[in-house]
Amino acid sequence: GRVADIRPCIGCLGCMETFVSERRLACTVNPFFGREAISDLKPTPIPKRILVIGGGPAGMQAGITAAARGHAVTLWERDSKLGGQVNLATVPPQKEELTNLIDYLRGQLLQYGVHLVLGKTAMPDDVLAFKPELVIVATGAKPAPLMALGDLKHGSVYSHWDVLSGRVSIGEKVAVVKADAHPAKKVIVAPKIPHGKRVRFGQGVEGLFKKRLLSRAVVKGDEIIIPNIALMGGFLPFV
């Protein structure tokens, strides 16, 4: 069989989240999910020379889709390997299987004849010299600016990129905060909740994930520990 053509599920439950929140069904890794009837990839009548900048999941899928329609596609990736932020997402324990997604996308790129150039930074002069008819920029996102956390010194506040990439070392007691434009959307691993008090989540944590977080809580001494916490946001590590 064509096992390599089976798109792997990463177990993020993004599909279930759209279902329970009564939104249009969607999948984190399959852009055609829920759109099968309108996603027929017909051959293009006018093949173009396309340059994709960025070799994360979005850039890889864009290259696959364009090549499947008959375009001549070249993909530039600044890093020495494909995968983008998914490479960071594979670092926490029990997340190693996320590499299956990158293996699948890499296989599809090769199957459709996409020319891969790794270790290539897309400078303006290089792009102009390549003379593409169309450029797809899929360079990904960067962590939000680090927020002020009370009396904590800036040197002890790090982004998830810093930690997962191994650029910094962390201690035994760590607070994990989701920082965005809404102060209510935070999750913090803090000292144990006193007896008789309720656990209240910010509005950024949906009902389905509240149950999952609580189901993984472990009481150890005077703390409540929830292992491997991370909140959904693009291709970050998932709970």
Image (cartoon, rainbow, N blue to C red):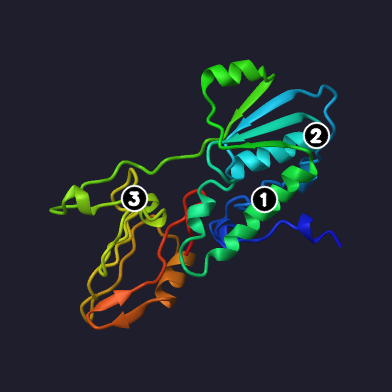
* Element type where label 3 sits in the image: loop
Residue at the left extreme? Answer: 151
Q: Sequence-wise, which precedes: disc 2 or disc 3? A: 2
Give residue 223's position: percent from left, percent from top.
Answer: 25, 77
Compared with residue 45, is residue 6 higher up or lower down, i.e. above or below? below
Give the image location of residue 193, x and y in percent.
24, 75
Helix, strand, or loop for circle 2? loop
Which residue appears at 31% of the width and 66% of the height?
200
Could you tell me which residue is drawn at 38 percent across and 76 percent down? 217
* Tag nearer the camera, 1 or 2: 2
Amino acid beneath label 2: Arg
Instruction: Identify the mark at residue 30; answer none if there is no mark.
Output: 1
Q: Which label was assigned to residue 229?
A: none
Is 31 displayed left or right of 112 in the figure? left
Kind of residue sitting beneath label 1: Asn
Instruction: State whether residue 108 appears in this view.
Output: yes
| 89 or 238: nearer the viewer | 89
Which quarter of the picture shows residue 198?
A: bottom left
- Residue position marked by numbered label 3 in the rendering: 159
Q: Which residue is mark 2?
A: 69
Distance in Å between CA atoms under marks 1 and 2: 17 Å
